[in-house]
Amino acid sequence: MKCPGESSKTCGGYFTMNVFETGLEKFVAKTPKTVGETGAVRIVFLLTLNGRALRQIHRLINALYRSNHYFYIHVDKRQDYLHRKLSILEKQYPNIKLATSRYSSIWGGASLLQMLIASMKDLFLLKWHWDYVINLSESDFPIKSLESLENFLSVNKGLNFVKSHGREVQRFIKKQGLDKTFIECETHMWRVGERKLPRGIVIDGGSDWVALSPQFVSYVTGKQDELLAGLEIVFKHTLLPAESFFHTALRNSQFCNTYVDNNLHVTNWKRKLGCKCQYKHVVDWCGCSPNDFKMEDWPRIQNTEDRQLFFARKFEPIINQEIITRVEQFIGFNDHHLLRNLEGYWQSIYHIDDLTSSTDDLLLTHAGSIIRQNAKILSEKGCTIDIYEIVEINSYNYADVYKGNLILHKAVLNKGSEIILETWYKQKKYMEFNFGNHLAENIKIFKVSSDYDQKEMIFRNLANILGPLSEPVLLYQFSPILEKKGENLTLIWLDPTGLIADVNVIIINENNLTNFIKPNLKIPLLPGIWKVGLFEHYELIVLTKFLITPLESFSGKDLTHQEASIIHSGSQNAYKDFSNIKPLHFLPDEEENILLQKISQSNIKRVNNDLKEWIDSLTSEFYNVLGLCVNQANLKDITNCGNYDFDDCSATEWSSLSPDPKGSIGKFNKISSRLDRV
């Protein structure tokens, strides 16, 4: 067509494009110096902690501690155990402070940014003189010496280190859900609608791990200007706000020329494993999370040697501790040959001083039964103990293999001395194979537990402690050399009365050799011994059993008849009709089924000692006591009991009371200004 403004020229057409240029210079992040005149630099390590990995936190502090640096520790409001244990450090070291205002943060929640801002405000109230604040979690660990970090930061004072998503802004906005309005309420991020982002603002983000200068931190935590006032409104209703707020404030403020596209971290991303929508229970979105480093990932850390990366994540000693020891050697630790229990790892599951300890009904029921089992073993050797209090329960790993749980408990010995004992126990393994079936030899894992972590492909419930209110999951793994793929197999869940509770179908293929099945079962589950069988055309391939432990107490009080009749009655009325499914030699016959139903009806009525006897009979079938020791302080009073000689816990390799220098805060060395572990 002829141009409306100039008829002598032609314009328009099917593929017409308009190209505009803003005239603004393209943003280029600052390049930090690698060499220069070094000087003193003071760092605040802002530790934002969750969970119960106390010994790993001690290990992290040991690696970073110098008397000229600071530690500001925020412990999640719900984590009473960690806060109580770390409060001791505040009294011992003037450069360690715990946050007094604590938040209950969730993955992706607005509360995480609120916590970071509140913590950074506190840094100025403490009158500390510092040059950088670096936020770390319990799953971070340094991958270069502290001296390397100090030298790097000292020649780059005033710069701010954040990690950007890259160039595609719109794609990042969509992926992060920044164009959606979220509200955090009752530990959940609710998506409530669409929204338009403010015009004239460059949206940026990528990672919530940062290293910031005091000038910029003072700006974002101080008196708000128009930019910050607007960003506060936007990010109050933003998913994953800590991954974007600091970046966006940097890009749009007078600090834009201090922006460095590097958060000093290397992160172990394995997208196929880490992007499983595992946070659906806390957020109306599907996010991703990095994986734990294992020894197989060591080359990724080695490859950072010549790069400006000083920390890595994630590390979990409950998953793999060997990689952490290797990293320590990599950054200059040379004391490993002097450390006792180098390959041991203990992590607290329960402590009597926890605010919620009295209502941990399943764990206390289970542990009480284990130590009663132990008391019977001692009584057979002429030693009488009266158990009256469980102090702590730990999980125990050695050389990255789960070795069982440890129960620290008080007891009265032979009606006289009060002692503290620790009992070591582990679940018995149970798998029954039908090697007449060609698939049986290809099965590597076939077990039931709860708290399955899709990202790490393990059960977090290491001891397989399940009760009527638990949600069991079956994990299976076939060998990669499996010949027959693409075959449909049947999974049958049998309750303690012999009724089929659920049936699942598994399709075996190359992408499905390791997977989990969550049955469609309503709670409460019927207490007792459950069975799960895997079948090919109703021919058994493999069978496993698992225990649903009856509860001895409810909300910290002994179970009443009325509560027992509700909690222990199961949900058999909710089962579907599976009468058409008749697996060979798996279901009890009619007479046995009637007997099992009668026994179950009788068990429902059990309370007090009668209930304990039932629980103990089930527990002894599934768990073995492996060892027993006594607290060193009690050895002065008693070394043996009847025909039983007590071991000293502090000299016993498996005990949580034995020395663990790597997992304890070291002794301050005035010469080196650091903590010595030996």
Image (cartoon, grey):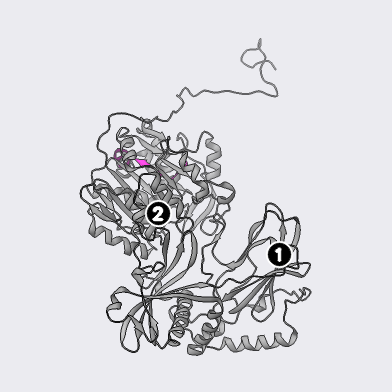
Q: Residue at x 72, y 81 (%)?
A: 588
In magenta stretch: residue 383: no
Amino acid marked by disc 2: Glu
Residue range corresponding to the magenta coloring = 205-217
For label 1, the residue is 440
Packing grade of label 2 (10 A; few <14, some 14-19, many >=20) is many
What percent of the width, then of the height, locates residue 532? 66, 71
Left or right of 662 in this view: 504: right
What percent of the width, then of the height, locates residue 653? 40, 66
Mark earlier in primary sequence (2, 1): 2
Towards the viewer: 555 or 626: 626
Amino acid marked by disc 1: Ala
Which quadrant would the C terminus be assigned to in this image? bottom left
Q: Is residue 475 visible?
A: yes
Left or right of 635 in this view: 623: right
Tell me whether circle 2 and circle 1 mark residues in contact (CB < 8 Å).
no
For label 2, the residue is 138
Looking at the picture, does residue 133 appear above or below residue 87? Answer: above
Q: Secondary structure at mark 2?
A: loop
What percent of the width, then of the height, locates residue 607? 50, 88
Q: Residue at x 32, y 80 (%)?
A: 639
Estimate the spatial distance between the alpha carbons at disc 2 and disc 1, rounded to whole Å. Answer: 41 Å
What percent of the width, then of the height, locates residue 129? 23, 43
Number of the front mark, 2 or 1: 1
Which quadrant would the N terminus be assigned to in this image? top right
